[in-house]
Image (cartoon, rainbow, N blue to C red):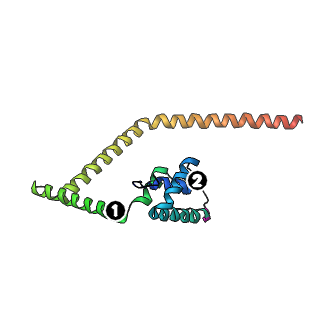
Amino acid sequence: MKGGPGHRCDPEEIFELADGALGPEREREVRTHLGCCPGCLALYQSELDLNASLGALQFEEPRSVCRVVAMALPTRSVKVRLLWAGLAVVLLLVASLALSLDGTNPAVFAVDALVTFWSFVSGFADVVRALLAAVGPALLVALAVGALLDLIIATVYLSVSRRRAREA
């Protein structure tokens, strides 16, 4: 970001200036740039307003947002988002057309993919069920031994505490 002709605007540095995250030298350069760039000055003012609004809010839990994501969100324009959405729709239509020309009905393809996924989940559930059936008796024995040990520990604790109570 330079103050003279041929300068480049860097929204990330504007955000860092508003957050107070720039060093003194860099802050001076960015403030000089703000003096000659109305677009960056407007962005700086809106970022200060946003910081003031967020600072006035009361949060029960501490806020944490990835800095890279936070820096990227305000710089995306609505036009760019609409272009990406349009591209996604076009790609979906092209893929659907390609499947149709290949002799595959896209709806049947989607249902087949869903059936394949469900078969995987069902098979995984069968494996887990068989594993639990095989390990079940050992788990019951371990739980019974644990319960028995808990009873022994409780009995010892009660007898020791009663003996100490009698001695005192």
The amino acid at mark 1 is Arg
Residue in view at x 12 percent, y 58 percent: 100
Indicate the quadrant containing the C terminus: top left, top right, bottom left or bottom right: top right
**Label 2 neighbour load within 10 Å: few <14, some 14-19, many 20+:** few
Image x and y of residue 158, in percent: 76, 38
Work out whether mark 1 precedes mark 2 in sequence or the reverse, and give the earlier one: 2
The amino acid at mark 2 is Gly
Image x and y of residue 24, in percent: 58, 48
Report the disc number at residue 20.
2
Whether the magenta-drawn stretch holds residue 158 is answered as no
Residue in view at x 39 percent, y 38 percent: 131
From the viewer's perspective, tell me whether residue 65 is left or right of residue 93: right
| Residue labelled with disc 1 | 81
Image x and y of residue 19, in percent: 56, 55
> Considering the numbered disc 1 on the image, is that residue within a helix, a strand or a loop?
helix
Determine if residue 101 is in view.
Answer: yes
From the viewer's perspective, tell me whether residue 8 is left or right of residue 147: left
